[in-house]
Image (spheres, rainbow, N blue to C red):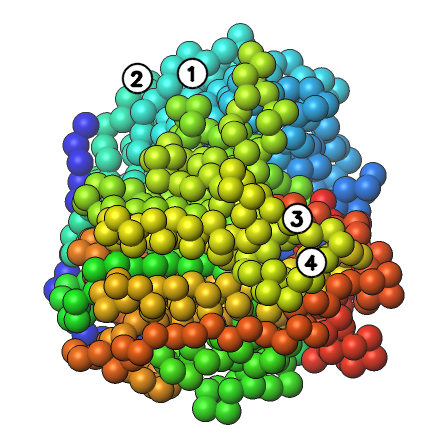
Amino acid sequence: MRLRWILILPIALTTPGAAQSREPLPTGKLITPRGAHVPVGSFPANMVPVLGGRYVVVSNAGFRQALTVIDTSTGKITGRRELNGSRDGLKEGLYYGLAPGVETADGQVLWASRGSEERVSTFLVDHDGTLRDGETSIAVPRPGGSKAPRDVIAGVALSSDGARLYAAGNMTSRHTAMRGTLSILETRSGRRLHAVAVAGFPYAVAALTVGPDADRKVYVSSERDAVVSVVDPVSGTVVRQIRTGSHPTALLLDKSQRHLYVSNAGSDTVSVVETRSDRVVETILLRPNDLRGLPGVTPLGMALSPDECRLYVALADMNAVAVVDVAKARLVGLIPVGWYPTSVAVSPDGLRLLVANARGTQERNPNSKPVGPGGTWGQYVANIIEGSVSVLDIPSDASLTGETLQVLTNNRISSARRTGIKNPGIKHVFYIIKENRTYDQVLGDLPQGNGDANLCLFPRAVTPNQHALAERFGLFDNFYCAADVSADGWNWSTSGMANEYTARNAMYGYSGRGRAYDYEGSNNGSPVDLMGLPDVATSPGGYIWDLCLKRGVSLRNYGFFVSDIGAEEKDAQGRSLASPNAALRAALKPYTNEDYLQFDMSYADSDAWVRYGCPAPKQKRSFGSGSARSRFEVWKADFDEYVRKGNLPRFVMIRLPRDHTQGTAVGFSSPRAMVADNDYAVGQVVEAISHSPYWKKSAIFILEDDAQAGHDHVDAHRSIAFVISPFCKRGAVDSRFYNTDSMLRTMELLLGLPPMCQYDAVADPMDCFTVKPENLEPYTAILPGREIVAEVNGATAFRSDWSARLNFAQADAVPDAVLNHILWHAVKGPNVPEPSSRSGLRVRMDDDD
């Protein structure tokens, strides 16, 4: 096996013709998408050519799903089938798998996976490019029985005669011994011939249909186990596992089927497998030399040129397509495309590329008013981002140099060489993560910032501490969460990026189509890291606590990645899967305070209710071995002990989740009361630190994991952020672009840590520190008014009936489009119109699963 490195051209700070004036994405990168762009719905995840490549068909994995047919010569949509209704009480839709079937006089049959509907259906693409439903829909039996999580059918492929269908089930769980399943089904009868146990979280499927091994080998990629399983479909057994790079995703056979290309999203490589021997013969690294060792390229879909001299690879996290010389097995250039490309196709004449951009081509997505045709997409961040297919001319070899330079500029590759910031003497870093607020929701009433007071739900009276801290230590009114929702938000906030599994399934699960919340240490409710299994949602660069431990930086954890798995949850041998409230990552276990309660809205963040003596009827009065009355009380007891002993860890992680709220559920604190409670907890933490001997060497960083739970007139990702230290510039208003990775990079630099991935490596640190302390005096927390802290939801609270039906036990189990509607009217009043209607999302209570 030979390892091939990327060809890196000299980096230019500017490129002729480059669109340098564009705003950065919330992720911090620029895009300069080439070609014309065809809107196709939410998060297009796959695309296949049909009818000899005259058309491509695109499928989606996000909120608004459809099959879309595009003419490869004109770039026009010729057919479309929306899949957003309900059937048998389930939301219909797609996921990933597309397999062209037989051609008939009418057109070509297309098999499409239907995701959590647990079936594969046929459609017919007519010769004129129109699309209609086919006659077959095969239900795939659920592995593990009826008690197992609903399966999600991913990749599909067909035998040479079309008599057998191969379908991968992507939902690995303890009910299947944490293995995945490849179902082999008869297409005529729908009968399952074999259920083959393959490596965990199987995704793409490719079947040999020509040559000596025709109909004797089926290849299945595993997003978790870094292998491709080789299945004999006749015997229904795994005959071999091919070790590839990390997170193998897409599979592509060449025309002769002598070679199989495997995109390894986690290791930024393409493996070339010789199918006669099932041996990896080449590994092509697609990571720029300037960032060697740092992940963040994320190769996904692939396509070969008609002469098979070039391989084109969608690089999701570089917003580019890689051009690979097949004969030399090396990368020769990069083409800039849209935001998060997932799939690529080549026109039959080899002159044009078609690229599916999961997140489209728009850098800013404000949600102060409804988006889409007639406002039909509403205002929820995960619903308003429109994916697209770019149709562009393939650049000549002469122009590919300039295109490559543009991609490197867009990705700020040269920025990774910066020395960073000067540390004014900060030794201890406190990292506080809260839940889901936009900038306008909280600080929109501050006249010195770029806010919209009409969108402010939690003004100074509710959040006096956050207002005071922003005014004293610095207001950041151009800060963005890199993530959409908590699923990817907790990974961006702790890893600097989200891997491809998280990026795709966050959108799929939040769309109401059923997917477990796999993104904070458990997979389908199992603590996989504690079981000795890989966590499929782990970003390729690991977590910031891993970096601390590797570099000898002491740490303490309060609420990050801890278990909400009940003691009654057992494995197949009857053993408890995890202790409630214990760390779900083995590395965190020794450093986690298990008395600090995980995500639970019935428990207070602060001591405000104690000060006023006003618990809500359904509030949890105490928790843990010390019967603490709030999360702050648990943290403060620990902190006081560290102060007494003089051994405070250098990196302290604190989760303060209650600004998420519990809607208007009767007997619980009102949304205003929970946000005020959260605000006072922030003030109390700052007060405790600022009155301690550690204050002169400390910096406190505070952000929201995402900004999904409200409106913002600039962008649905814009959020509140705070940096608090004696060395912060007093009263500054900083309107420079910063994001989640900016905060991570700043903390890393203060702690002497290297970056985890390409995103934090190139992020601008938050330039807010002075050489001499300007904010040395201690801070005193401001107690919000009793009339706010004591508010309790009654039976007449707005949509209390809806809130009673919603699941607040886990982060983001509630559809935020629904919760946002409740919060607006709970705060503003039932007769005060929202900035505009949310389309049908606010009343789709059937999607609450």
Alpha carbon distance from label 1 to label 4: 70 Å
Amino acid beneath label 2: Ser
Instruction: List x then y, in percent, for residue 133.
Output: 75, 44
Camera-side residue of 375 and 346: 375
Q: Residue furthest top?
A: 235
Amino acid beneath label 1: Asp
From the image, tell me which residue sits under label 3: 620
Instruction: List x then y, in percent, for residue 339.
Output: 44, 62
Which residue is pictured at 48% across the width and 86% down the height? 450
Which residue is pictured at 37% across the width and 19% down the height? 241
Q: Quadrant of residue 221?
A: top left
Q: Residues within 10 Å of mark 1 (few under 14, many from 20)?
A: some
Alpha carbon distance from label 4 to label 3: 8 Å
Residues tagged 1 and 4 counted as in contact (Cβ below 8 A):
no
Instruction: List x then y, in percent, for residue 653.
Output: 38, 52
From the image, tell me which residue sits under label 4: 615
Which residue is pictured at 34% across the width and 59% down the height? 430
Specify which label sits upstream in the sequence, 2 or 4. Answer: 2
Residues tagged 3 and 1 counted as in contact (Cβ below 8 A):
no
Q: Quadrant of the N terminus?
A: top left
Camera-side residue of 479 and 423: 423
Q: Residues within 10 Å of mark 2 (few under 14, many from 20)?
A: few
Specify which label sits upstream in the sequence, 3 or 1. Answer: 1
Instruction: Name above or below for residue 543 compared with residue 424.
Output: above
Which residue is pictured at 54% across the width and 60% down the height? 606
Specify which label sits upstream in the sequence, 1 or 4. Answer: 1
Instruction: Name above or below for residue 339 compared with residue 729.
Output: above
From the image, tell me which residue sits under label 1: 213
Camera-side residue of 625 and 169: 625
Amino acid beneath label 3: Lys
